[in-house]
Image (cartoon, rainbow, N blue to C red):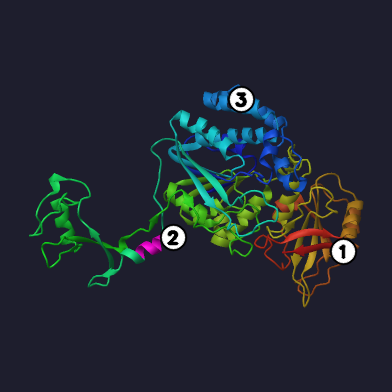
Amino acid sequence: MNKLFYGDNLDIMRKFIPDESVDLCYIDPPFNSKRNYNQIYNNIGQEDTAQAQAFIDTWTWDDAAEHGLSEIQINEEQRYSLQTIYQVNGFELALGKGSLLAYLVSLTLRMNEIRRILKPTGSFYLHCDPTASHYLKIILDSIYCSRGGEFINEITWKRRTGMMQTTGNRKFGAITDTILIYSRSGNYTFNPQYSFSDPSYTAYVNKFFKYTDKDGRRYASDNLASPSPRPNLIYEYKGYKPPAYGWAVSEDKMRQFEEEGRLEFPENKNQRIRRKRYLDELKGKPIQSLWDDIEPLTRYSQERLGYPTQKPEALLDRIIRASSNEGDTVFDAYCGCGTTVAVAHRLNRKWIGIDITYQSISLISKRLEDTYGKEVTDSLELSGVPKDLEGARALALRRDDKTRKEFEKWAVLTYSNNRAMINEKKGSDKGIDGIALVMAPHAAPQRIIFSVKSGNVQVSDIRDLRGTVEREKAAGGIFITLSSPKPSMIQEAKSAGFIDNSYFPAPVEKIKIVTVEEILSGARFQLPLAYEVVKSAAMKVKQSKQGIIFDD
């Protein structure tokens, strides 16, 4: 069964993924490469706050980083090779305890665990960029090569066209990503991949495949002379004398070529026999370590979901075809928007995905349902998502989520069937945790505002939501609460009246209270939505003096 986990990938791998159970793992972990390299190395941290916010939020030297470093240095449960311990110790001395070391420690813990779950024939692909790829390669060498594994390739993927030039640039543009490939052993799965679209392949075909036989098949006429002396292959064939160095093939092979109609016999027997090589039997140009034929996603790409680090399906298609076979298990520990699992499903692989944000889990579920149908998501094993009030409370009180955003995301996206937009602002959200757009007759879509509360709730919370709805000129509001609402709250909500929209099949309260218990029992938002919001996730919510506006 395919599995999708919500939570920390290190904990999940250790608890739920057995040894040697995965054929291929690809990860594209978060990393903010906009930071200046020297600033990362020296841990100065003076770069633009807005650019570095994601990096700082994810990679800071905190208790988790300290615990991870200690686990490696004391070799907890004998998980690590001596080479890995030495390398991490060296990085601590060279870099100090800062954001970069926190990043490297976090990745070391997880990459070491990935090796454990790989089958002996398995491969690991790490997608990164030049900001830290040199550090990561050293760590991967210590994890894999010290234990019988192999470094296979360093792939360079051209992820941008590089046509734009910023005024005042003092360096060459960064337009490539790095993909490091390692194997658990020397006996790894590899299926060569080929391309028909490479311009050099087209030129090669046009230059050499210029002949057509009586069956209409295009072919190239190849020389059958050996380029170096081969005395054992000097023989006369049907009156045609051998080349000076002999033929390129044995007499038995020559006879096989003739039986298959692959030989050209000149009328003049002083000339040489040549071999026909048919165009329709070519597999294409073998793919090498430079991948410049896979186009990056643009804002106009049909498959784009608005996820900031989304990779094109063609990239994962090549990786999965190259390093796995049908029926194999593909694993992605940083699922994001689910490109790996979606492509694995299409290619008839089993798959496992993990992500630490509920928004990603929601997006993946919606993507699979839209692409393959509801039966796929119904048969999916989904773990880590609240299934009862106890689980919902645990999510709301997660220690690593001080803003309770993950609980809010789960509540809004679950109740809206993954069709609402989340307000990503971590500071002053103006009482708005999410937005849904509903159809309106002969007018722009109407907005429904979501407010989520996980603590004690009062009638003042309903009044606040009413005020937010009026201020933002929204059609109505939905108040989701973990606690049971008080009678005064219900009365206040009812006093707001109903939404004016003739598209609605029945009257809808302007302010609706929904409990988490009702959501867990299957209650869902049933209004006619204006957009499939998850599919149109490139739309961004931004604040203005006039309220919320939508910008795509």
Residue at numbered disc 3? 89
- Disc nearer the start of the sequence (1/2): 2
Residue span colored magenta: 196-205
Residue placed furthest toward the left = 239
In the displayed structure, 125 sits above or below 87; it is below
Indicate whether residue 202 is drawn in magenta. Answer: yes
Q: In this view, does 542 lie above or below 128?
A: below
Task: Tell me the mark number nearer the camera, choosing from 3 and 2.
Answer: 2
**Disc 3 and disc 2 in contact, CB within 8 angstroms:** no
Under circle 2, the secondary element is loop
The dominant secondary structure in magenta is helix
Above or below: residue 486 compared with residue 70: below
Neighbor class of circle 1 (other Cα within 10 Å; few <14, some 14-19, many 20+) is few
- The residue pinned by badge 2 equals 198
Residue 546 is tagged as 1
Amino acid carrying label 3: it is Asn
Q: Residues within 10 Å of mark 2 (few under 14, many from 20)?
A: some
Q: Position of residue 71 (x, y in %)?
A: 62, 26
